[in-house]
Image (cartoon, rainbow, N blue to C red):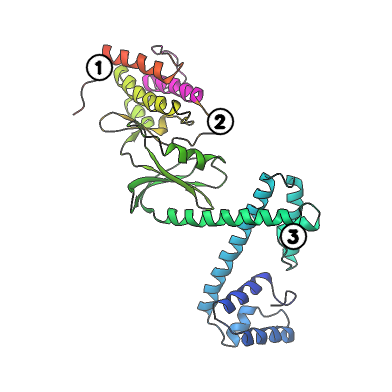
């Protein structure tokens, strides 16, 4: 299609119509001739309908394909820019300037790949563009596989919505019932997927095991063991405050899971009352492991344990009027809590 006669959308639509055998080359040439004679007053869609080449329903279907393709092109441009930046081949300013030029050219119906613009500006060599494109193709292949993995999860029930994203109960043909968390792009930390995949090797009775994690292109997904429980936040609010022995038992369970993670150089990173579930057996199960900020370690987890201890006993995470504990390590914390439990045991649950 001739760029001066047709818009970018119309060019894409005609190409896809030809590829999918909606139109013949002769019919497309007729549309070009008709546009030359009639001018831009009629859109390509109008011409196709007037000549009875396509029905409105077929045009609508092709338009959806055009939108999907345009979205994919935008995603690939962003991926190309990220790879260039990560490899240190161009500065952010050089990439931004090239992207602005690409948008300006697109507005004039001129398609110019980002790599070509960077070569023309002397920022990249052709060899460097080839290397980036090869890495981009590998990333696209991985992303395609991960999208298929994500589609295998069938949502059953929405469980909640938080600052990071949504979580629902879902079913998987292999994993069975899971808690599926979907985090939009930009909200997850850059190393979250790798960290979560490492956590999938960690199992402990006081944590919801991470089953798998991956990227969908629009963000990331995390499938974890489904835990039927009440968030500690609701459990404490409903009781105003917890008995000393029950608080000790719950925190000891959390500390046990943290001790296992810290022994393998892993951390929760975002421990708070919403991320501790209390089961009907009054046991603590930690969820959202590994979704904290990059660099979070045992120190952050132990400070969070101190706040949990105060919250469970007073209803206020900043109230320090509670029995003192050693928060030097998860192991020392467990020892102190076990001593409290022995002094004031929790009645056996039915």
Where is the C terminus found, in terms of image quarters? top left
Residue at the farthest front position: 127
Q: Is residue 67 left or right of residue 30?
A: left
Residue 310 belongs to the span the image colors magenta: yes
**Other-residue count near label 1 (Cα within 10 Å), few / some / many at <14 / 14–19 / ≥20:** some
What residue does disc 1 label?
345
Q: Is residue 331 visible?
A: yes
What kind of element bears circle 2? loop
Q: Main secondary structure of the magenta part?
A: helix
Nearest-to-viewer mark from 2 and 3: 3
Image disc number at residue 295 = 2
Q: Tell me the number on the disc at residue 251.
A: none
Write the start and end of the magenta stretch as one range.
298-324
- Relative depth, front residue between 24 and 62: 24
Circle 1 — which element?
Answer: loop
Q: Earlier in the sequence, mark 2 or mark 1?
A: 2
Q: Dot 3, crowdedness within 10 Å: few (<14), some or many (≥20)? A: some
Residue 240 visible in the shown view: no
Instruction: Name the residue located 73 percent from the left edge and 45 percent from the top edge.
Output: 92
């Amino acid at each position: 299609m001739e760029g001066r006669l047709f818009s970018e959308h119309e060019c894409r639509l005609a190409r896809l119509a030809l590829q999918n055998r909606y139109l013949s080359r002769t019919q497309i040439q007729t549309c070009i001739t008709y546009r030359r004679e009639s001018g831009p007053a009629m859109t390509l869609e109008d011409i196709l309908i007037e000549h009875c080449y396509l029905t409105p329903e077929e045009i609508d279907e092709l338009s959806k394909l055009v939108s999907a393709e345009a979205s994919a092109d935008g995603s690939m441009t962003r991926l190309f820019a990220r790879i260039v930046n990560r490899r240190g081949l161009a500065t952010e300013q050089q990439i931004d300037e090239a992207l602005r030029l690409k948008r300006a050219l697109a507005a004039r119906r001129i398609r110019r790949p980002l790599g070509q613009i960077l070569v023309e500006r002397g920022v990249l060599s052709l060899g460097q563009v080839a290397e980036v494109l090869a890495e981009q193709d590998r990333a696209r292949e991985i992303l395609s596989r991960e999208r298929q993995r994500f589609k295998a999860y069938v949502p059953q029930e929405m469980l909640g919505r938080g600052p990071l994203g949504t979580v629902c109960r879902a079913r998987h043909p292999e994993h069975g019932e899971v808690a599926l968390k979907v985090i939009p792009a930009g909200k997850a930390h850059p190393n979250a997927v790798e960290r979560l995949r490492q956590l999938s090797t960690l199992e402990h009775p006081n944590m919801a095991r991470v089953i798998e994690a991956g990227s969908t292109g629009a963000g990331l997904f995390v499938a974890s063991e489904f835990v039927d429980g009440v968030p500690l936040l609701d459990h404490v609010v409903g009781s105003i405050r917890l008995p000393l022995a029950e608080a000790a038992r719950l925190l000891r369970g959390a500390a046990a899971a943290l001790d296992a993670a810290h022994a393998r150089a892993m951390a929760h990173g975002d421990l708070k009352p919403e991320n501790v579930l209390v089961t009907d057996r009054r046991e603590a199960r930690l969820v959202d492991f590994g979704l904290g900020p990059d660099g979070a370690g045992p120190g952050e987890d132990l400070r969070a344990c101190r706040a949990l201890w105060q919250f469970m006993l007073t209803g206020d995470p900043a109230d320090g009027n509670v029995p003192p504990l050693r928060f030097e390590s998860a192991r020392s914390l467990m020892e102190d809590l076990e001593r409290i439990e022995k002094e004031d045991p929790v009645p056996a649950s039915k």
